[in-house]
Amino acid sequence: MSASCSWATVWNASPTPSYPPTFADQVVAQPARAQFEAFLDEHRGALNGCLDGLTEEQVRRSLVASRTTLLGLVKHATFVEKVWFDEAVTCRSRAEIGIPATSDESFILDDDDTIATVQHAHREACEASRHATSSLGLDDILHGHRRGPLPLRWVYLHVLRELAQHCGHADILREQLINE
């Protein structure tokens, strides 16, 4: 990550460079589930925090050919949380949950989407995800996703991979905006 969106900044740690919290000894010694959750929360926080300090115009600015914007990435991450930890866990449809039918649609920004509203919705979705999986084990099977039954362990890994990719996208977009 660039200095503009460092782990230290996101986690309100000291201003000196440091390793992400998941490198801390207390996380390494934890059971696998706690490690998964620490990595997920670290990436959730990093993505959400990459909007901090920017203007509404900056976070909506399109810098690539796709619909990808910083605000759109965080809005999409909210969609991801709801697909994998609401739809897959509860077996409710996307329409029932109130989310777009496709991933591509989740990047579309509405006029009332702001940094504050999108960050808040993302934090709420992450909290709902934690709650939805709190009683599940890593090997418990989730039946509500379109791909079919999947163990929670696979879902954690998939979401972590997606969040890591989007954190990289966000870091590059943020760097472009700040260096304009």
Image: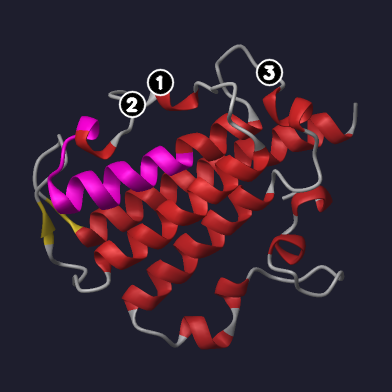
Upstream in the sequence, badge 1 or badge 3? Answer: 3
Query: Neighbour class for label 1 at 10 Å: few (<14), some, many (≥20)?
Result: some
Q: Which label number is shown at residue 44?
A: none
**Vertical placement of residue 151 versus 179, above or below:** below
Query: Residue at coordinates 61% horizontally, 11% vertically from top-left?
Result: 65
Q: Of helix, strand and loop, which one carries label 1? A: helix
- The Cα atoms of the two marked residues, 3 and 2, are separated by 21 Å
Q: Of helix, strand and loop, which one carries label 2? A: loop
- Asked whether 81 or 157 is in front, the reply is 81
Amino acid marked by disc 2:
Pro
- The Cα atoms of the two marked residues, 1 and 3, are separated by 16 Å
Query: Neighbour class for label 2 at 10 Å: few (<14), some, many (≥20)?
Result: some
**Vertical placement of residue 48 versus 38, above or below:** above
Q: Which label number is shown at residue 105?
A: 1
Which stretch is magenta? 77-95
Residue bearing mark 3: 62
**Would you identify the image quadrant in which residue 42 lies?**
bottom right
Quadrant containing the C terminus is top right
Residue bearing mark 2: 100
Q: Give the left or right position of residue 52, taking residue 104 as reference.
A: right
Mark 2 and mark 1 residues within 8 Å of each other at the beta carbon: yes
